[in-house]
Image (tube, helix red, strand yellow):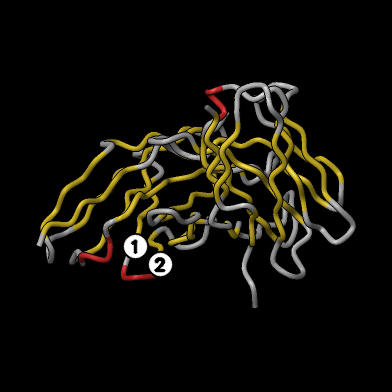
Amino acid sequence: AQSVTQLGSHVSVSEGALVLLRCNYSSSVPPYLFWYVQYPNQGLQLLLKYTSAATLVKGINGFEAEFKKSETSFHLTKPSAHMSDAAEYFCAVRDTGGSYIPTFGRGTSLIVHP
Amino acid sequence: DAGVTQSPTHLIKTRGQHVTLRCSPISGHKSVSWYQQVLGQGPQFIFQYYEKEERGRGNFPDRFSARQFPNYSSELNVNALLLGDSALYLCASSLNSGSNYSPLHFGNGTRLTVT
């Protein structure tokens, strides 16, 4: 069964600093991979997705992620953090065949300091 | 266009009671999924419905049930509530299910507190 591991339940950065949120996946077949963001008291919003096209995926709000099969990773980055980026971020994986249902990681809380 | 709407937004119940949560998908979306998000964790899949049929079920007890109506809206029912059922319940809709990829669109959730 597919799964994702998000390293670090909390990541703290200064405004303007690089954001790096880590996600490693475990899947028996080449997966689809997603990053979602959740602001307080809201549902999840899709940031970006990898569906076996380009390995470097650009998303909304200046975020991007790179699929690395050799490292089974799909880390999320942003060159310069804004205060508005403070939120919970979830990595998710689903198989390209079989079950449609995505499996979510435990989430990483991004804290941005002025 | 309206997004996914869920009602109520907050709910407080007592142990042993039952609860019904409602979800209206984005217009044109035929698939609805339900997730439970316990504080500090990622969403856990409960059910998926497509064209009024159950297409998937997560590892939840039979106290949890759901259905989808002809207008594609959906209800999640939980019987004999336990303290551990306290969570944010998220509904997500998508155009279709299965091998044709379509992204999930989430509602803002229903916060259920069981006392």
Is the residue under label 1 in contact with that under label 2 (CB below 8 Å)? Answer: yes
The disc at residue A59 is 2
Query: Would residue B39 appear left or right of A111 to someone viewing this image?
Result: right
Query: Would residue B40 appear left or right of A33 to someone viewing this image?
Result: left
Query: Would residue A91 appear left or right of A112 to someone viewing this image?
Result: right
Nearest the camera: A56 or A36?
A36
Instruction: Name above or below for residue B65 compared with residue B104.
Output: above
Q: Earlier in the sequence, mark 2 or mark 1?
A: 2
Give the image quarter of residue B58: top right
Indicate the position of residue B88 as horizontal and vertical percent values: 52, 42
- Determine whether the residue tagged by mark 1 lies in a helix, strand or loop: strand
Q: Chain of mark 1?
A: A
The disc at residue A64 is 1
Q: Amino acid at mark 2?
A: Gly
Residue at x-position 28% and y-position 37%:
A9
Residue that extends furthest to the right in the rendered view of this protein = B70
Q: Chain of mark 2?
A: A
- Determine whether the residue tagged by mark 2 lies in a helix, strand or loop: loop
Indicate the position of residue A18 as horizontal and vertical percent values: 16, 59
